[in-house]
Image (spheres, rainbow, N blue to C red):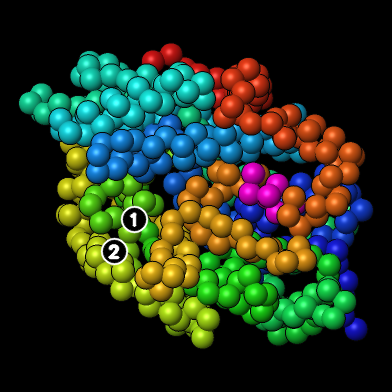
Amino acid sequence: MAEQADVVLVGAGTMSATLGVLLRSLDPSLNIMMVESLDGPARESSDGWNNAGTGHAGYCELNYTPQDQDGNIDISKAVNINANFEISLQLWSWLVEQGHLPEPEQFINPTPHLSFVWGEKNVAFLKKRHELLSQHHLFQDMVYSEDPEQLRQWMPLVMAERSADTPVAATRVPYGADVDFGALTRHLVQYLDGQDHFELRTHTKVRDLKQRDNGTWSVELEDTHTDRVYRVRTRFVFLGAGGAALPLLHKSGIPEGKGYGGFPVSGQWLVCRNPEVVAQHEAKVYGKAAVGAPPMSVPHLDTRIIGGERSLLFGPFAGFTTKFLKSGSVTDLMKSMNVGNVKPMVGAGLDNMPLTVYLMREALQSQKSRMGSLRDYYPQARSDDWELAQAGQRVQIIKQDPKKGGKLEFGTEIIVSEDGSLAALLGASPGASTAVRAMLDVIERCFPKRQKNPDWKERIGEMIPSYGRSLADDPQLARAVRARTLSALRLRRRPA
């Protein structure tokens, strides 16, 4: 006889944990089951070492403010991402205030966000970018400088022994954040695990899922420890399993998932744990991506605090892979192809051959070459201080395109069945940073009647005071929200 659950969350990463917390807070009577194929939460993309840990707010990420051929800079994406990150900060603040999350330092730490460029053309771009962004209330505290002495105060390692002949510039926001998403996710799941009507099942793989005639879902699970295969019937399924979400979406058979494909990208970091070096850098310093590089490959030199340990990270160095998960199989890409998505995938592949060549070249580069890239940002870097570490897998979205057959997209997208009984999250950056806004979107689309209930609206408003209003359009609201979150999460700005 099949087991029963109101909600089945597939994957124990940041997205599923966030959705679980929201649903549990809105309706404590819901029977929620979270299933994870590995031995615990946050083992894949959400793990601290598998992502950059940047609280993506648009402060430093230059790819969020693209410049067209005429020199025009579009800041709309940066504004949207910033507003969405503020929504995440509100929920985390509420959870800390309620005692559902531990002291903020265990998962988030203040780390200034800087953009750094060199060369006349890039300096002109950064100056114009700052002029546009700083006029918006969400970015009004961003500071711009071309003064080498000021830049040395902001980032001494980056400026040490740098040639005075090349013009340089940087912007800085003092209250950026470094987030240990692995720790955050594990704390969220720990909170859920202490609530009634919640169960986490690890070493549990989804083999299949089918919608029944009455609209509910039959999810076939396998306990990989005992090889036991069984079924769970549920009213709602969320596929938040990183790269594994795409093949599960295909197995669901919902029409909305047809035509979607995935382009897997791997990554590597250079990591420094030498305390003498680490102590000299406290910032996330982002530069411009190389020509032909995917947006997720923007180089950056970062302070990281993972599990309480401080280190420096540089990268990412992209690579070519056919795995959809770090723990996945080299056959993942081939198995994901079917009649519905083969045309988009081939079309996107042909249209992005330079990207494929770039990724393969990145994967084959030597340690000497990687250190050369690092020295663009840290001229005095010593090879003995840095080791190579494997980052997580990302699966970029491939969609149907009437002109090219298929197109590759960088970002995240939520696919929802017509009846709202199943939702899947595909894509990558900004990902975890905007998880709360993404999961509110799932609730609004999959639980529309209940979401409109005054009790649910009031409860969401307690957790996220700005809910239903625009932080991007309301300066007074944005300032009030930011003052609260900076205080609750101890992200108070530091003097330059």
Are the residues at dot 1 and dot 2 in contact (C-beta closer than 8 Å)? yes
Left or right of 78, for residue 154 = left
From the image, tell me which residue sits under label 1.
294
Res. 225 image quadrant: bottom right
From the image, tell me which residue sits under label 2.
355
Q: Quadrant of the N terminus?
A: bottom right
Res. 446 image quadrant: bottom right
Q: Can you say whether 282 is above or below 266 in the image?
A: above
Q: Name the amino acid type tagged 2.
A: Leu
Packing grade of label 1 (10 A; few <14, some 14-19, many >=20) is: some
Q: Give the mark nearer the N terminus: 1 vs 2.
A: 1
Cα distance, mark 1 to mark 2?
A: 7 Å
Left or right of 307, for residue 443 = right
Q: Name the amino acid type tagged 1.
A: Pro
Name the residue nearer the viewer: 52 or 190. Answer: 52
Residue at point 80% right, 52% down? 448
Name the residue nearer the viewer: 22 or 405. Answer: 405
Name the residue nearer the viewer: 456 or 107. Answer: 456
**Spot occupied by residue 381 in the image (x, y as percentages of width and height):** 21, 40
Residue at point 21% right, 47% down? 373
Report if residue 449 is visible in the image.
Answer: yes
Queried whether the magenta region covers residue 246, the answer comes back as no
Residue most extreme to the left? 165
Q: Can you say whether 74 is above or below 30 in the image?
A: above
Count of numbered tags: 2
Residue at point 34% right, 35% down? 73
Magenta span: predominant SS is helix
Packing grade of label 2 (10 A; few <14, some 14-19, many >=20) is: some
**Spot occupied by residue 469 in the image (x, y as percentages of width and height):** 69, 31
Report if residue 325 is visible in the image.
Answer: no
Magenta stretch, residue numbers = 437-443
